Amino acid sequence: MSVFPPFALNRPGSLSDALSLLTFDDVPLGGGPELLLAMRMRILRPDSLVDLKRIPELLTVTLDEGEVVIGGAVTHQAASTSAVVHQHLPLLPEVLDQVGNPRVRASGTLAGNLVFAEPKSDVIPILMSMDAKIVLTSSEATRSLTIDEFILGPYYSAREPDELLTAIRIPVGLIANGVYEKYQTMERPTVGVAVLDLKTTSSDIAPSVRRVVVGAVGERPYLADFAPSDSIDGHEVAAHIEPIPDIAGSARYKRHVTGVTVNRAVAKLNGLVHP
């Protein structure tokens, strides 16, 4: 069995202390499933880990100015069982309950999944479909990015070494209906599809956009917006995606599975929508 390379462990009790410790070689530790695996494989060899689990403001799920705010150290399980999330974003727990396995859900964080820019993610496409934004904080400044701006490629995000993803902010009241459909043959999805009917503002009566986000099959999630009345052909959507061939299947196979999964998601959503 492989062992970890040597590293120091810092356990700050405040956000300011954590930010003062971050460098290229001193990296944040939320839950750690992906980070620790990369360290075991010697892909990453940080000098130290900055444990975030003692910083109170990173462990909360709150409602603030019309947005659900999920702290940077909140686990999939904690977000899934949050009363705030269940009340305002009922689709999100359905997705989070499908992430990985019980160990990953209990220890892994939403922020960690985003920072790692895991291409085979359930979290990234559903958050993108919901117009989520992430908050990056350093000792000098704070900035906000969309998921599309933040995920630059496989395992490559826009976080700078001195920054911490402190929060995920998701607007409420915009989702009229939504479904998440995925196909997988192993622990991680082969393709994950979110289809949501979205309103422009929370005061709108009817949705103005039907959004399709396809994740896990290409290097980055694919997003397309349609009019609610549009007929969506999953295989036409799949034609715009360049699948990554791997152990789960060839590019041709993945494109076909993507088309089928999109069609299933659209059909499921149509079954929820009543004229």
Image (cartoon, rainbow, N blue to C red):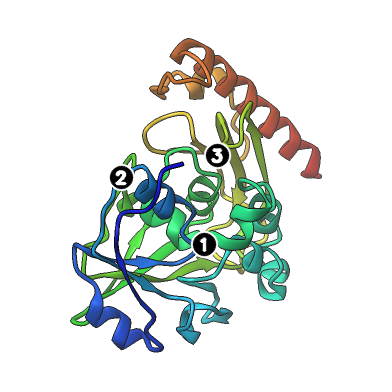
For residue 109, the mark is 1
Badge 3 is on which residue? 227
Is residue 4 found left or right of 208 in the rendered image?
left
Q: Compared with residue 107, is residue 182 higher up or lower down, i.e. above or below? A: above
- Residue 225, x across and y down, in percent: 48, 40
- Residue 25, x across and y down, in percent: 20, 63
Q: Compared with residue 166, is residue 184 higher up or lower down, i.e. above or below? A: above
Q: CA distance from mark 3 to mark 2?
A: 47 Å
Q: What's the amino acid at mark 1?
A: Thr
Residue depicted at 63% across the width and 61% down the height: 106
Q: Nearer the viewer, mark 1 or mark 2?
A: 2
Instruction: Name the N-terminal-most of marks 3 and 1.
Output: 1
Instruction: Name the N-terminal-most of marks 1 and 2.
Output: 2
- Quarter of the image with the C terminus is top right
Residue depicted at 45% across the width and 67% down the height: 30
Q: Compared with residue 159, is residue 214 higher up or lower down, i.e. above or below? A: above
Q: What's the amino acid at mark 2?
A: Arg
Q: Which element carries disc 1, helix, strand or loop?
A: loop
Q: What's the amino acid at mark 3?
A: Ala
Badge 2 is on which residue? 42
